[in-house]
Image (cartoon, coloured by chain):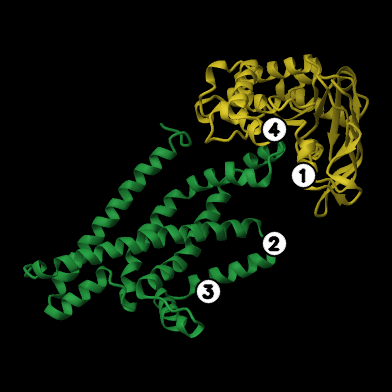
Chain colours: A green, B yellow
């Protein structure tokens, strides 16, 4: 193995890693936000709207991310949606993650004991107050482990963005390996970067979880 | 204290084909304690939950101080705003306490004052402290529910209800989820409330409480209200064989 090529490609790889983190972070945040909206619609909207949203969930979950990206990037211009690679990738990642996040939130909300909602109704709280003060805080806490888990899965989905020429890490690694034929070295570095990212997320996630569940979980 | 009266007239409730409440009639007098007793599944809790419309009744009328609960007219449900308005003066205490676990005891009590009564945080917390002191928890105000015993949690739940200054209190088996040694502290708080002249409706298996604190006891079985009378006449000289048989089983289970 020969790692000297990294002197030449190092900066490009780091830049690629930066883009990977950017795509992942924004895609996760936006995907979660959209997923939360979907979960609330599923819980409160009239049934026709729920059906439409359910169809969206089925379609996005039932098709490969790669295909969704192609449709968005190459099909988008046909309906006037002309996006650069990076914004298209971000939008794609947001859409791809949203139904999974929605399902996580949905089960998180279901984990909130119904009695605690009834107690709020019994003293005359509005449904909006109940969502803000009871359902969201408690539902989010019970969603947390699954949210962190799926965010970690999403880190690795970012490599698919290279297909539509988003200049993230996979894209840079591909370029480097086709120019130098150092496939193994390049991909090992890619693996190392991802491992670092995932390890960081899961550590931060665990710490965060421990902090906000301090009063909610029985310590033995 | 202003105390509400409740009139229950020919109330029926169905769960699909199951007839859960059958033409129930009951008068709940202002400032008095009414205990609902009877076997599990007899409809006591359902009836109680109909009073604040957590459970919708299908026909009949429930009137609180003359105003019909849940409906503007038979078959026409009232607006959410009006329902919330009526619920503000009805406190409820649940078997499972149902405190909000992410809030301290004081925050649990203050929440309704802030969100429903529109009080400022400082004033709400002051009132919450007073309510918690009243139920004997002055030293537990900053505890989260998980750091409290069952009896303490239930007293927080009572404080949460009385802080709203209700004119009627509903208790749904308030001591059934408690360890036996913690039942007393909750019943004592309830006795204090009763002595202050609060209208109370209590679903309970505590026959001692019914005998000593209730002004009237209503016995239910299979969705029917079988009898209403003074505690003495229901518990010591029941005429109806269904009440006799229920009490016989109760005494057998509790004798040793």
Q: From the image, tell me which residue sits under label 2.
A: A46
User: Chain ID for label 3?
Assistant: A
Q: Quadrant of residue B171?
A: top right
Q: CA distance from mark 4 to mark 1?
A: 13 Å
Disc on the earlier residue, 4 or 1: 1
Question: Do badges 4 and 1 share one subunit?
Answer: yes
Disc number placed over residue B81 in the picture, else none: 1
Answer whether labels 1 and 2 touch (C-beta < 8 Å): no
Label 3 residue SS: helix
Q: In the rendering, at what x and y percent does residue A71 appear?
A: 45, 80
Q: Residues within 10 Å of mark 4 (few under 14, many from 20)?
A: some
Would you say residue B213 is visible in this rendering?
yes
Q: CA distance from mark 3 to mark 2?
A: 21 Å
Disc number placed over residue B113 in the picture, else none: none
In this picture, residue B70 sits left or right of residue A113: right
Disc number placed over residue A59 in the picture, else none: 3
Question: Do badges 4 and 2 share one subunit?
Answer: no
Q: Residue at x 53, y 56 (%)?
A: A36
Q: Quadrant of residue B190?
A: top right
Q: In the rendering, at what x and y percent does residue B67 appear?
A: 89, 37
User: Chain ID for label 4?
Assistant: B
Answer whether labels 3 and 1 touch (C-beta < 8 Å): no
Q: Quadrant of residue A114?
A: top right
In this picture, residue A133 sits left or right of residue A150: right
In this picture, residue A52 sits left or right of residue A88: right
Q: Residue at x 51, y 60 (%)?
A: A35
Disc number placed over residue B117 in the picture, else none: 4
Q: Image height check: is A144 above or below B5?
A: below
Question: Do badges 3 and 2 share one subunit?
Answer: yes
């Amino acid at each position: 193995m020969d790692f000297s090529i990294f002197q030449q490609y190092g900066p490009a790889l780091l830049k690629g890693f930066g883009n990977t983190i950017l795509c992942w972070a924004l895609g996760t945040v936006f995907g979660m936000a959209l997923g939360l909206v979907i979960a609330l619609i599923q819980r409160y909207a009239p049934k026709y709207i729920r059906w439409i949203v359910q169809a969206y969930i089925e379609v996005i979950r039932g098709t490969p991310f790669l295909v969704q990206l192609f449709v968005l990037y190459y099909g988008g211009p046909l309906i006037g949606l002309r996006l650069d690679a990076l914004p298209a990738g971000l939008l794609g990642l947001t859409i791809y993650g949203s139904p999974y996040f929605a399902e996580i939130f949905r089960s998180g909300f279901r984990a909130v004991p119904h009695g605690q909602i009834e107690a709020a109704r019994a003293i005359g709280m509005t449904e909006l107050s109940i969502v803000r003060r009871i359902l969201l805080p408690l539902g989010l806490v019970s969603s947390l482990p699954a949210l962190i888990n799926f965010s970690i899965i999403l880190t690795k989905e970012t490599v698919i963005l290279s297909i539509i020429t988003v200049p993230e890490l996979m894209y840079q690694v591909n370029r480097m390996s086709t120019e130098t034929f150092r496939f193994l070295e390049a991909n090992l570095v890619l693996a190392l970067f991802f491992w670092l990212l995932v390890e960081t997320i899961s550590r931060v996630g665990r710490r965060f979880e421990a902090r906000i569940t301090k009063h909610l979980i029985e310590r033995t | 204290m202003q105390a509400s009266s409740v009139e229950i007239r020919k109330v029926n409730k169905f769960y699909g084909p199951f007839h859960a409440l059958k033409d129930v009639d009951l008068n709940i007098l202002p400032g008095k304690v009414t205990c609902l007793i009877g076997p599990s599944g007899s409809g006591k809790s359902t009836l109680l939950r109909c009073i604040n419309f957590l459970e919708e009744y299908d026909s009949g009328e429930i009137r609180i101080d003359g105003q019909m609960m849940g409906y503007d007219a038979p078959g026409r449900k009232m607006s959410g705003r009006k329902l919330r308005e009526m619920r503000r003066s009805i406190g409820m205490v649940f078997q499972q306490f149902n405190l909000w676990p992410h809030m301290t005891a004081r925050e649990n009590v203050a929440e309704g004052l802030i969100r429903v009564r529109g009080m400022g945080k400082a004033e709400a917390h002051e009132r919450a402290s007073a309510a918690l002191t009243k139920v004997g928890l002055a030293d537990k105000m900053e505890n989260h529910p998980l750091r409290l015993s069952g009896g303490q949690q239930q007293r927080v739940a009572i404080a949460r209800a009385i802080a709203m200054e209700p004119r009627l209190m509903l208790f749904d088996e308030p001591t059934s989820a408690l360890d036996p040694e913690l039942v007393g502290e909750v019943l004592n708080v309830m006795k204090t409330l009763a002595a202050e002249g609060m209208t109370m409706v209590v679903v309970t298996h505590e026959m001692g409480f019914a005998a000593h604190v209730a002004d009237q006891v209503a016995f239910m079985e299979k969705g029917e209200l079988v009898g209403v009378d003074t505690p003495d006449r229901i518990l010591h000289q029941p005429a109806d064989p269904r009440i006799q048989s229920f009490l016989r089983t109760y005494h057998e289970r509790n004798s040793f």
